[in-house]
Image: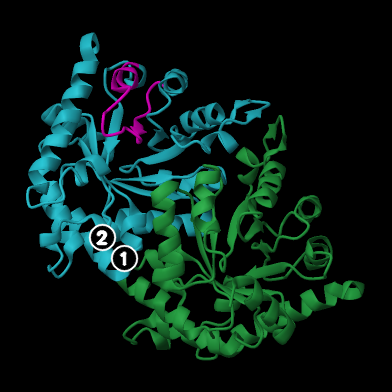
Chain colours: A cyan, B green
Amino acid sequence: MSFLEKYSDTVQRNNSFVCVGLDPDPAKLPEHLKGKSNPTRAFLTEIIAATRDIACAYKPNFAFFGAQGIAGWEALQGAVRAIPNDMPIILDFKAGDIGNTAEQYAYMAYRELGVDAVTVNPLMGTDAIDPFLAYQNGCAFLLCLTSNPGSADILRLNTDRGVLYEVLAQRAVEWSETGPCGLVVGATHPDDLKTIREIATDLPILLPGVGPQGGQTNAIVQNGLDHKGSGILVNSSRSVLYASSSTDFADAARQSAEDLRQMLNSARGGKR
Amino acid sequence: MSFLEKYSDTVQRNNSFVCVGLDPDPAKLPEHLKGKSNPTRAFLTEIIAATRDIACAYKPNFAFFGAQGIAGWEALQGAVRAIPNDMPIILDFKAGDIGNTAEQYAYMAYRELGVDAVTVNPLMGTDAIDPFLAYQNGCAFLLCLTSNPGSADILRLNTDRGVLYEVLAQRAVEWSETGPCGLVVGATHPDDLKTIREIATDLPILLPGVGPQGGQTNAIVQNGLDHKGSGILVNSSRSVLYASSSTDFADAARQSAEDLRQMLNSARGGKR
């Protein structure tokens, strides 16, 4: 199954746009797991079991695994195995290199780890994207506009072809003719999301940056949905993973994911 | 010792601007190493031993290790251990994320792996850079202008503050007031390198993309050196690593690195 097929299936089956971000921070793991041989793997296995009928996708964030070295790599492999085969996994890596190096990153994601999609940084242009597009069952989620204050430094520069993030959205549409692409758009900019959706009418959009309160979910959903009433993945990491730091962490994670699912579904309103 | 101290020392001691790139491709390893428990680690240990008095730095390319999973991670750790403590190691990762994720990448590089510098993608702005600048003994080499054809797609866009790569060079100068920064500039653009050196007068510049023939080394050196006649790291990966695919691979690698060292030193000419 391709990424897009898996995504479409889980959106239907779980009635959900919730993407659960896996950012395991050893300092935040529940105390009772710290004696396990691989606490991060044990933690994520329970998180996944508690949310697999609520999420539409999972997004492991490579940084939090890489920072733990080999134990982190093993935890990442464990998470990939624990996620049901028919649910899409997006490796959040922000891969940004070219040519044979980009080929190695695509191999790492799609073959070595066995995920379904990867986040990719488009700064270096076509040569940074093409090796990912060669995986026709995958999906390259290209950074477009991020939610941090510093996103204005570069991504909002005015170019002679439009604001940079608009240029990136336009290029993504062109690149998507070669292979599956999506966009990463910070959830804190719903107005800009509208502009981006008007450019990239058919691309899936991954939306990180939804806070614990789920603020702006109405605007995100209204502005982000495509003409079929789908095409968004609203990511929540910390508010799901660390909803409780006690033995009830999995139940609390489930509740947090459920709350976000309901908020997003309410916001769909007449769009469904 | 900081990255800049190590770099300055090895440039002097080895009379060299050669950075040896470690891009281990399993398909290209010498046949006689393939029976080793970790062929990549065995290969790199010999490459490093053969070039440690010729190089000014090493640059492991994460993609080639990541693509090999845990065996790759072990080979990367082995390479870091095999490189003398007083020689600088640049992890080529193109890290491009923000906030606590960028902190994890910086931790991975500087603490978990123990390298001296990291390549960083500046697309997401200040928040993507700051966590690396916090390591005052490190150095964040920011992508500025790459050597690939697609670099024109984004990096050469005209913005209302100049061509994008010039804006990035200017921002790097500002960021370097917070912590050590360098730039990554493709060796195939010596004219643009001149412009960049005029903007970033004091920053070290990492120059990938020197081909096997070492073409344009004169222009690279003349345009890249800083006012002290230093400040460049000219990277060569494949032409050193795969100079021979036989049992003499280490000698051949040494000769290739030596040829590049001599070409670069000849090009210094009156600048020394």
- What is the chain identity of the residue bearing mark 1? A
Residue A272 in view of the camera: no
For the N terminus of chain A, which image quadrant?
top left
Residue B130 in view of the camera: yes
- Disc 1, disc 2: CB below 8 Å? yes
Which residue in the rendered view is the most extreme toward the right?
A: B270
Q: Residue at x 65, y 80 (%)?
A: B55
The residue segment tinted magenta is: A201-222
Sooner in the amino-acid sequence: mark 1 or mark 2: 2
Give the residue type at disc 2: Pro
**Residue B151, relative to residue B28: is it above or below?**
above
User: Which percent across, then down, holds residue B185?
Assistant: 67, 56
Which quadrant of the figure has residue A68? bottom left
Q: Residue at x 45, y 73 (%)?
A: B114
Residue B215 has which mark? none
- Magenta-colored stretch includes residue A216: yes
Q: Which residue is mark 1?
A: A68
Q: Secondary structure at mark 2?
A: helix
State the CA–CA distance, disc 1 to disc 2. Answer: 9 Å
Residue A26 has which mark? 2
